[in-house]
Image (spheres, rainbow, N blue to C red):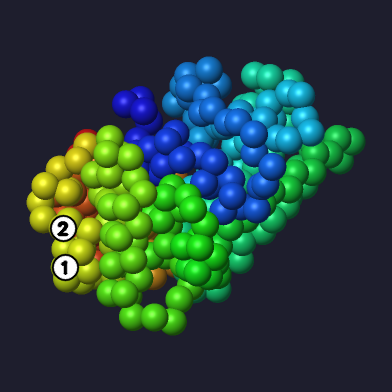
């Protein structure tokens, strides 16, 4: 993880509650599961998560690639294809693919399949995957399941109740059902995911709030990912082109650098000037 800046809170959920994400995607009959160390695949080009899952009626573990996307990013299809191919090259088995999208973004479409063709159209490869749009998942469907690993996703789901009531129920469930060794991390991750949708310190305080929550080592990544997306949105609005190739570089920067770049994105003369400033910020 040190070699490539991924969302650590998402990785923590995948590694500790991967079966919960599988249930979120409609995978049932789970007998056993285990996360696979990223280095087994290929350093610096890792999917957000790779799980080996034993399903009832099967004798062998099935590989599942899990990719978390804050928004429906245009590069998501490329990531899913790359991840599937990496696992196939390593294992000679095509994995099942799950894409979990945390928040909507305008009318950006979310494809569920793609076809790759060779330059002369003599070779073709078609891939499809499961997509979970969290904002379309009823919160009641997650809360009725006796699985505390589903609770952190609830603030991003669909509900008609006041947010305060939903967040209080998340806190109650974590306090009641989470193992002592995981309680603080589950509260912290739930707070971070809540921040993707709301900007209310009162809501965050329900989950613990305060600076101590934000000092947990795996939380800065997801907040920086959102900050980076905001910067790319500003640049696209100003120049009509979204420099997605800068996304990873932006996410690798700290909060202070991203805030400064956000201000510069609003006034920079062109994309080349912004690229130069990004490189200076490293």
User: How far separated are the C-alphas under marks 2 and 1?
Assistant: 7 Å
44 horizontally vs 271: left or right: right
* Location of residue 7 (image quadrant): top left
36 horizontally vs 253: left or right: right
Q: Quadrant of the N terminus?
A: top left
When the figure is inspected, residue 76 is found, relative to residue 133, above or below; the finding is above
Please, which residue is most extreme toward the right here?
122
| Picture residue at 38% right of the left edge, 54% below the top | 152
Answer whether residue 47 is visible to the viewer in this image. Answer: yes
Label 1 environment density (alpha carbons within 10 Å; few <14, some 14–19, many ≥20): few
Which residue is disc 1 drawn over?
Answer: 201
Please, which residue is most extreme toward the left here?
211
Element under label 2?
A: loop
When the figure is inspected, residue 197 is found, relative to residue 114, above or below; the finding is below
The disc placed on residue 250 is none
| Picture residue at 17% right of the left edge, 56% below the top | 208
Q: Position of residue 280 (x, y in %)?
A: 20, 39
Which residue is disc 2 drawn over?
Answer: 209
When the figure is inspected, residue 203 is found, relative to residue 36, above or below; the finding is below
Answer whether residue 88 is visible to the viewer in this image. Answer: no
| Picture residue at 39% right of the left edge, 80% below the top | 161
| Picture residue at 43% right of the left edge, 48% below the top | 149
* Location of residue 153 (image quadrant): bottom left
Element under label 1?
A: helix
Contact (Cβ within 8 Å) of mark 2 with mark 1? yes
When the figure is inspected, residue 157 is found, relative to residue 278, above or below; the finding is below
Q: Nearer the viewer, residue 232 or 138?
A: 138
Label 2 environment density (alpha carbons within 10 Å; few <14, some 14–19, many ≥20): some
């Amino acid at each position: 993880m040190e070699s490539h800046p991924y969302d650590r809170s998402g990785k923590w959920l995948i590694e500790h509650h991967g079966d919960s994400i599988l249930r979120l995607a409609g995978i049932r009959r789970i007998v056993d599961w285990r996360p696979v160390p990223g280095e087994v695949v290929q350093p610096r080009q890792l999917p957000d998560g790779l799980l080996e899952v034993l399903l009832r009626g099967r004798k062998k573990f099935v590989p599942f690639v899990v990719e978390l996307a804050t928004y429906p990013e245009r590069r998501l299809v490329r990531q899913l294809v790359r991840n599937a191919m990496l696992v196939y090259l390593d294992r000679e088995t095509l994995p099942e693919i799950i894409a979990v999208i945390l928040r909507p973004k305008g009318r950006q479409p979310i494809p569920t399949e793609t076809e790759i063709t060779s330059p002369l159209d003599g070779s073709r490869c078609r891939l499809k995957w499961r997509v979970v749009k969290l904002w379309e998942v009823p919160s009641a469907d997650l809360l009725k399941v006796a699985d505390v690993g589903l609770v952190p996703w609830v603030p991003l789901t669909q509900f008609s109740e006041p947010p305060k009531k939903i967040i209080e129920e998340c806190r109650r469930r974590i306090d009641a059902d989470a193992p002592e060794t995981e309680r603080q991390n589950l509260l912290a991750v739930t707070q971070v995911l809540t921040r993707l949708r709301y900007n209310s310190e009162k809501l965050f305080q329900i989950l613990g709030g305060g600076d101590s929550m934000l000092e947990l080592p795996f939380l800065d990544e997801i907040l920086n990912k959102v900050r980076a997306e905001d910067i790319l949105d500003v640049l696209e609005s100003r120049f009509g082109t979204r420099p997605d190739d800068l996304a990873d570089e932006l996410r690798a920067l700290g909060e202070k650098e991203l805030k400064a770049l956000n201000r510069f994105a609003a006034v920079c003369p062109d994309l080349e000037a912004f690229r130069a400033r990004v490189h200076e910020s490293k």
